[in-house]
Image (cartoon, rainbow, N blue to C red):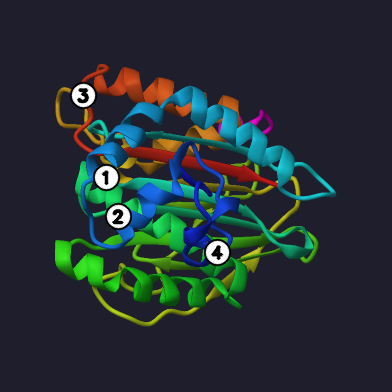
Amino acid sequence: MIAVEREDEGIVALVGQAAKIEAAVVIPASALAQVWRGGGPRSARLARLIAGAESDALDEARAKEVGERLGSRDKADVAARCRPAESVGGDFYNLLRLSGDRVGVMIGDVSSHGFGAALIMALALAAAGVHAESAASPGEVLRRLEESLADELARTDMFLTLLYGVVDPATGRLTYASAGHAFAYLVHGPAGAWRRLEATRPPLGLGAGSTDVTVPWHRGEDILVLLTDGIVDATDANGGRFGEQRVLGHVTRLHARPTREILDAIFTDLAAFTGGGPASDDRTAVLLRV
């Protein structure tokens, strides 16, 4: 939910292609550069920028724009929503148009929330946009991203679960790498068939090494479902867990509908389940069909 606005030319070499990041919050590059150098007097301004721009309306507008930009043969049907538990959070998502009509999609969850997690999120999104343009595989993107974030993760004692996948509709393949991100699914159709996209390495900051996994992708039929644990682990008044099956039930039942309608159904059900009370963790979901 952070895009980099190139406000001053001095930061261009640092952010590279990060301006291609598709997200809901725009942070001036000068503010991001200050954070990248370890914080400073502009940190409070950055917090205000993040908090002030976070909204469902922006998520929906950006998802629509991304859907129109991704892929030249077919428009991507994409819906994304992020609701932080505090004024700023540590969840994020990213969608990128890659060469050959491929689509890159990323979701991440910093092991905390609030301003500190949001700073990690900002750094991760900026670096991910650069690495996704140049790395040969999703696993390599994760490896380079961990290198970029190593000092900050060590300093803050945080870690980051993250999944990055590349959908190639032309060849019918989804290739992904997952740094301990447990809530990623590929739903094949209205019959209810789905598979979990298993982790391929530990979370960033907790161990190195990564491999890629490639699974079949059916153009126009498969839906990639990416969640953070704030949705799956949300509880009702009796301590009952919302769970992944409830989310996937909406995806299969409404499989033929636009992804935005599916996402609305999930969040409406979630609000009813939790009684509309305050969330204890950030809640993010991304649905992609192409």
Q: Which residue is mark 2?
A: 35
The numbered mark, 2 or 4, whose residue comes first in the sequence reads 4
State which region is magenta: 252-258
The amino acid on which the numbered mark 1 sits, given as a three-letter code, is: Arg
State the SS at label 1.
loop
- Mark whose residue sits in front, 2 or 3: 2
Q: Which residue is mark 1?
A: 42
- Mark whose residue sits in front, 1 or 3: 1
Could you tell me if residue 1 is visible in this image? Answer: no
Q: Which residue is mark 3?
A: 278
Cβ–Cβ below 8 Å for labels 2 and 1? yes
Residue drawn at x 58%, y 28% is 61
Could you tell me if residue 41 is visible in this image? Answer: yes
As rendered, which of 252 and 285 lies closer to the eye? 285
The numbered mark, 1 or 3, whose residue comes first in the sequence reads 1
Of the 4 image quadrants, the one containing the N terminus is top left
The amino acid on which the numbered mark 3 sits, given as a three-letter code, is: Pro
The numbered mark, 2 or 1, whose residue comes first in the sequence reads 2
Cβ–Cβ below 8 Å for labels 4 and 3? no
Q: CA distance from mark 2 to mark 1?
A: 8 Å
Residue drawn at x 57%, y 75% is 135
As rendered, which of 217 and 13 lies closer to the eye? 13
